[in-house]
Amino acid sequence: MDHALVETIQRIGGIMGAHTVAEGVDSEEVLAALTLIGVDFVQGLQVRRPVPLVQIHEEVLRSGDTSNIRRSGLRPLMSS
């Protein structure tokens, strides 16, 4: 049921031209399934442990690249 629901949401997002984000990705199994489904971005313990928002802000400022969403805890699954 969960797989079918995520797959359907991904299809609808694709039709609408929207990016999809899966939250709570805490295992390699789930990450692999989401990759096969085509989800655009993931976040969760499998990607990065929670950190204070101020830490993320400081990391982004230090990097000088504010477009780097990986630092925000989101991980792109597909290259655009």
Image (cartoon, rainbow, N blue to C red):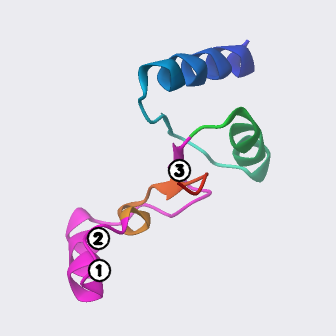
Q: For the magenta stretch, what is the residue range? A: 40-68
Residue 23 is situated, as x and y percent measured from the top left of the image, at: 50, 39
User: Does residue 35 belong to the magenta stretch?
Assistant: no
The kind of secondary structure element at disc 3 is loop
Which residue bears the numbered disc 3? 44
At x 30% / y 67%, what residue is drawn? 67
Number of numbered labels in the structure image: 3
Q: Residue at x 37, y 62 (%)?
A: 69
- Which amino acid type corresponds to the residue marked 1 in the rendered image? Glu
C-alpha distance separating marks 3 and 1: 18 Å
> Label 3 amino acid?
Gly
The answer to whether residue 11 is above or below residue 22 is: above
Q: Which residue is mark 2?
A: 56
Of 48 and 66, which appears nearest the observer? 66
Q: Residues within 10 Å of mark 3 (few under 14, many from 20)?
A: some
Residue for point 49% across, 63% down = 49
User: Residue 2 appears in which quarter of the rendering?
Assistant: top right
